[in-house]
Amino acid sequence: MQYVSSTESATLCLLYGIGYIVLAAVAIPLYLAVLFVGLPYDLLHSIRWFFRFLGEDQTFGSSPVIGS
């Protein structure tokens, strides 16, 4: 068995804790949305809207009007 230092094990514990918190923060609202709304179309629509918003945000950031 390999020896693991206490700081290393604490770091791993912290990373696993953060990972589980992030997983729960993503999975629980998604589960509730599927449960209450019955969501497949709405989920695809919101993902598409989100990426469209990101695309608009990027094109807004690189506006050609600044050079004139």
Image: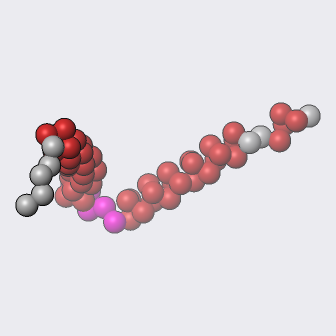
| Residue 30 on the magenta span | no
- Counting from the top left corner in percent of width and height, residue 32 is at 21, 52
- Counting from the top left corner in percent of width and height, residue 27 is at 24, 54
Which residue is the extreme one toward the bottom?
40
- Display coloring: secondary structure
Image quarter (top left, top right, bottom left or bottom right) of the N terminus: bottom left
Res 3 visible:
yes
Task: Tell me: residue 58, above or below residue 51.
Answer: above
Q: Residue 42 occupies which quadrant of the picture?
A: bottom left
Q: Residue 34 occupies which quadrant of the picture?
A: bottom left
Res 33 visible:
no
What residue lies at 38% left-to-right and 65% top-to-bottom?
41
Which residue is the extreme one toward the right?
68
Q: Is residue 46 left or right of residue 57?
A: left
- Counting from the top left corner in percent of width and height, residue 65 is at 84, 37
Instruction: Name the main secondary structure of what is drawn in magenta.
Output: helix
For the residue pair 46 and 7, the one nearer the viewer reads as 7
For the residue pair 65 and 6, the one nearer the viewer reads as 6
| Residue 39 on the magenta span | yes
Q: Is residue 15 left or right of residue 49?
A: left
Q: Is residue 34 left or right of residue 60?
A: left
What residue lies at 69% left-to-right and 39% top-to-bottom?
61
What residue lies at 62% left-to-right and 51% top-to-bottom?
55
Numbered range of the magenta stretch: 36-40
- Counting from the top left corner in percent of width and height, residue 19 is at 24, 48
Image quarter (top left, top right, bottom left or bottom right) of the C terminus: top right
